[in-house]
Every structure is written in C-alpha cells, then in structure tokens.
Amino acid sequence: MASEGDSKRVLHRVKDTLKIDGPDPSITDLLDFYLNNTNMHGMRRIAVSKGPIKKTIWIVFSLIAVAMVFWQGIQLIQSFYSIAVSVTINYQKLPFPAITVCSLNPYKYNQSQALLEKLDRNTAVALHNIGIAVTNLSAAKRDDEPLPIPLVWLDTTVTNQTVVTDVISGKFHVVPGEVEMRSYFSQNYQSSEPLIAIEVCGEERKCIYNAFTSAIDAVIQWYRLHFINIMAIVPEKDKDKLGYSADEFIIDCLFSGTVCDPSTSFKKLQHPILGNCFTFNDGSDGKSLDIASAGIDYGLHMVLNTRQDNSLPYLAMGAGAKIGIHLQNTTPFIEAVGIDIPPAMESSLGLRVNDVQKLGDPYSDCTMDGSDIDVKSLYDSPYSVQTCQNSCFQWEMIKSCGCANYEQPLPEGSRFCNYDNNPGWEYCYYRLYDMYIKEELKCIQVCRQICSETEHEVTLSLADWPSKASKGWLLRALSKEQGLPANDTLKPSDIAIVNIYFKDLTQKTISESPASSIVTLLSNLGGLLGLWLSCSMLCVVEVLEIFCVDFPWILLKKLLTTCSSAFASLVRGPDPAPSVHFPVQLPVGGSPAEDPPTFHTAMQCPREPIPMPNTPPPQYNTLRLRQIAGYVPDGGSDGED
C-alpha cells in the first residue's frame, strides 16, 4: 500500500504539471477575500458572523465607525490649516518713518490763472445758472465754443424719454427711452426734480451720465475732470513752477530739537493732483534716522504755510495740508490715505509701530514680495496691494482706451489721456472703472495681500494755534522770516503746525503660526484609526490597494475581454449552424456552469470525462493507487477482484 505521504507528493506533482485554469476573479470575490483577510476587526466580523442579524449589526457598526473616522478626520485636517495669532511687544530703538507732506492748495493761482482761465470762466457761469451767486460773475462770459465734457440737467419727469439740458449754454435735446446713469440710481429712476450730471460720450454718441443729487459735488467732479485734461499735457518742469517750493511751503523744521533745512532735508515728489509734495527721511541716500527716546521733543516739528489767499477757487475745497506716514523707499498714496492737517491748529501725530506677519501657502494666499504676481509694477518701490492694483488698472486703461490715466504713473512709450488727442477717453475710463469696482477686471483678484508689512498706528490730537497772548508777536516774527513787508503779516489761517513723534518705543509684532504641525496631524489620525477601526496606517494602504489597484484592474480586464470578444465575433462573422449533433459527456456533478467564478475554482484541476477501458488492467498490488484529489471513477472499487 502506498503511504499517505506518497499520495501528497503525487498530488503536488499533478498540480505542478497540469495546466490550472478557471474563470477570472470578480469584484465580489475580491470583497470576500478582503473581508476574510483584513486586519480591521469589524470588517472581518461581517464575513465570519453566522446569521443575517449578526451580519447586519456588524455592518451598521462598521459603517458608523467609518463615518466617525471621516467626520473627525475632516475636523483634524481643518484644524491643521487653522492658525494661531501671537502678539509680541519689544522695546527697542525705532527707525523714524518717511514723512510726505503736501499742500491742499497745490498750485499758485496767480501762476496758473492763464492756464485755467477758460475753465474757471465756464465754472462761474455754471454756478450762476445753477443758482449759486458768484462774486466775479461780471468777468464770467460764456464762450462760443463749449467745453468737451458738458455739465447737464436730466429731466426724467416725462415717461419714456429724458430731456438733457446743458447747464452752461441752456441748449437741450431729448433722449428717447432711459439714459444710462452711472450712479446708484436704478435705470428707471423717476424724480420730481431734475438731476445734475456729467455727460461723457464715446463713439457713435453712446453716452453715460454721471448723476449727482448735490450740485456742489457735480461741479467739483466736473471741474476736476477738466483740470486733469488740461494738466495731462503740461510738461513736468512747468507744473513744478506752478506749485510751491520747499522753502515757500515749509517755514520751519526741527528734528529731535535740531534744525533741518527744507531745501536739503526734503525730497520733492510730483503728485498729479496735489502738485509739489516733499518727503522727509525718504531713504534715497541709504541712511535711516533712528529714535532712541519717545515723546514730542524727539520727533519732527514743521511749520507750514498753506497760503490760502493764492489758492485755486474751484479745485482746493479744503485748506491746510496732507501728511503721509510710510516706510522708506515706498510710494505714499497720500491723496487716498493721507491725514488732513487743518490750518490755525497745532496737530500732534503720535505713532506706534505694528509688524504684521502672515503665513503663506497653504494657510493663506498672501505673497512674500509680489514676484509671483502677474502684474508689471509701474512704481519704483516694493510691492503693495495699492501699487499692484493701480498698475493693473493702468495697463488695462492703455489696452482698452489707448492712453494712460493721468492719476497713475506713465508707462514708457505711452501718453496721458487728453480730449484733444483722445476724444471720448472719459467714456472708456468710466466703463473701465465701473468694471474695476464690480471686480469684473482681474486686478482685485490678482493683487494679493503681502505676508509681512509694517504699519504705523497714528493718534491725532489738535490744539488751537496761536494763543491769544502770543498771536501778535508770533505772526510778525514768522512774517519777517518769510521776507514779507511790514504791512503784510501772515494770518493764523495760513499756518499749520505739525508734530510727528513716537508715543513709546514699543514695537508690537502680530504673527501667525500653525495651530498644529504635520506630526501632530498624523498622530491624531493614527489614534483616530485605532479608536474606531482598530487598524494602523497599513490598513489604509490595504484599502487603497483594494479599491485603487485591484478594483480598477478587474474592471479593466473585464472591459478588455468584452471588447476583444466583440471584435473577434465581428471579424469571424456568425457561426454556421451545426448539421450533426454529438453527445457531450458532462463531468460528474453537473454542467460547467455550476462552478461559480471564485478564487477557489481557479485552483481546481479540470475534470474531463474519462473513458472506461475495454480490458481491465492486471491486478497487481504494486499498481494500486490511493484516491487522488477525491476522484473515484464510476464503477471503480477499492477492494480486490
């Protein structure tokens, strides 16, 4: 008799020799294999539990655990991207900021009167026709040639039409339907009183009406628009002569008790609207003025002459000066964010320094230095949101309107817009500016905040100047220093006193830091997986292998097999009908379709019909074999004949 070990060796030899074949595994087989072999206890209990009730309970528990992992995992990831803000206060010697000062009366009226004569004359007529008395009306005569940008009345009392009347000439025309108003009014706005508006028209007489409810605001904006048109073609050297020099504007200057010369200590800056401005401690020489003590005696003291008796009547609505406080070698946007300094007052500006440091990607979209911003800067200064947005709008203006906005820096090879060279540019400008405000241009989205910046917190305090006791001698002394004759004395309304100093030498640093690190995040996720699913990160790899590798591979194989079979059938054509039928002997146990496509059937030997021999073999004991692989032929006997 052959031993059991011999039978096993024969069985292994048969398995190694015979070709193993069977159906491909399916997704169901893969899931069955995974549930029986996974390291997650809950998943295994689904496969090994007996009865539908236990299986259902374990399915519910497993789904709850998976849901908890996803929910708490999302919270952990969100907390990873959150930030913590810390505030640090240091006491140290501080660098004094750059100070830019401009007069609210930018140009000498006696020097620019000839340049603005026609505009001033028409403005006086417009004010008179509006119903505002003008002292110099006798000199105001209406020109035969109207200004290119009219100031008009809009009468919307009549349905389906608007009557447009020129304020200066009195001529009117009727616009059928509703006019396009650039205001917060709706297009079908109806008013019992006419509205005053600025009419700007482009090509083909397409017009926009910039409407106002206040006639004063309308006249100021209308005058400013014409003033920009005029100054856009005036050379820089001529504009410099129209304004005031540093010695004329800054009467006296002290820094930390030391006299500073206005002509040498201040650098001139040409502003498109405010004219000649002057910057103290601008940093162009590479030097920085440091302050070692706080208080008003250790800052900058200036006495400014605003010269109200020689100001432009329709441009300078306010009196005094504008102060801009900024870092060295940066551009001051003084008209937008400057501090107004009133005349006949002593203004004290106390400073504190705040450093703001933000986290970049992935915590925010701030930029470090603007090098990753797709906007070419027109400013000779470091990146800021304002320089980026102004540069972006200027490039869009040149692209859309064919000329540059006068209030922004001029790119090389371009020229400022002017109604003589670019008729209708105002219409294009208003269209573009409305798109900018509505964020339809890319400028606001592209120009991101900077990650690190220094801000100066300003506290303003005011006091009357001069006092009654010192008024007489103080004004006479200042007039004498200015070289005025004895009968010509400065008035308090001409003088503005400014003190700029550090309130203390503390520098507050506001910095952001990650609320959690990547190590903390991974540790928390690992604990979460162990708590709810009793598995480690290897279980995650296991799940990824099943669902990201095996699943797609099975689906791809099935798709390729289906496509290959369809293509082969198409090439082969329909099979001919068989004329002779032969009996097919099925294997013992049923038809081939009874074997489901599982992983186990792929390991079974093919069972083919074995023909019975006509002559029985000799009955030699040495040739007798034990049952192999559980197969016993029909009619076979394990005993001796």
Image (cartoon, grey):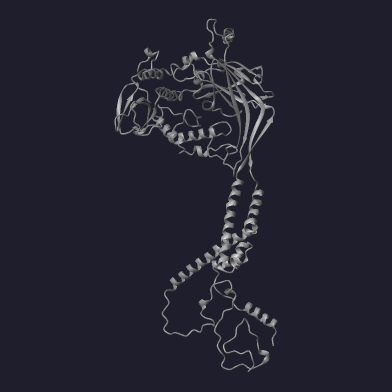
Give percent across and percent down for residue 430.
42, 32
Image location (x, y in percent) of residue 344: 54, 15
Q: For this view, does 150 lie left or right of residue 260? A: left
Question: On screen, 6 above or below 380?
Answer: below
> Which residue: 61% across, 46% down?
79
> Viewed as shown, does residue 505 lie left or right of 333?
right
**Res 287 seen here:** no
Q: Is residue 246 left or right of residue 4?
A: left
Q: Quadrant of the C terminus?
A: bottom right
Query: Residue 595 versus residue 533: which sits nearer the camera?
Result: 533
At x 37% / y 12%, what residue is drawn? 138
Q: Is residue 168 left or right of residue 631?
A: left
Res 413 seen here: yes
Image location (x, y in percent) of residue 351: 62, 25
Q: Residue 192 occupies which quadrant of the picture?
A: top left
Residue drawn 54% across and 10% down? 490
- Nearer the observer, 126 or 569: 126
User: Which picture quadrant has residue 176?
Assistant: top left
Q: Is residue 326 above or below residue 608?
A: above
At 57% from the left edge and 18% from the top edge, which residue is drawn? 246
Check the image and report above or below for 189 versus 15: above
- Residue 563 image position (x, y, % from top left): 48, 67
Please state, as top left, top right, bottom left or bottom right, where the N terminus lies in the image.
bottom right
As drawn, the residue found furthest toward the front would be: 53
User: Nearest the camera: 527 or 337?
Assistant: 527
Q: Quadrant of residue 341?
A: top right
Q: Nearer the viewer, residue 47 or 298?
A: 47
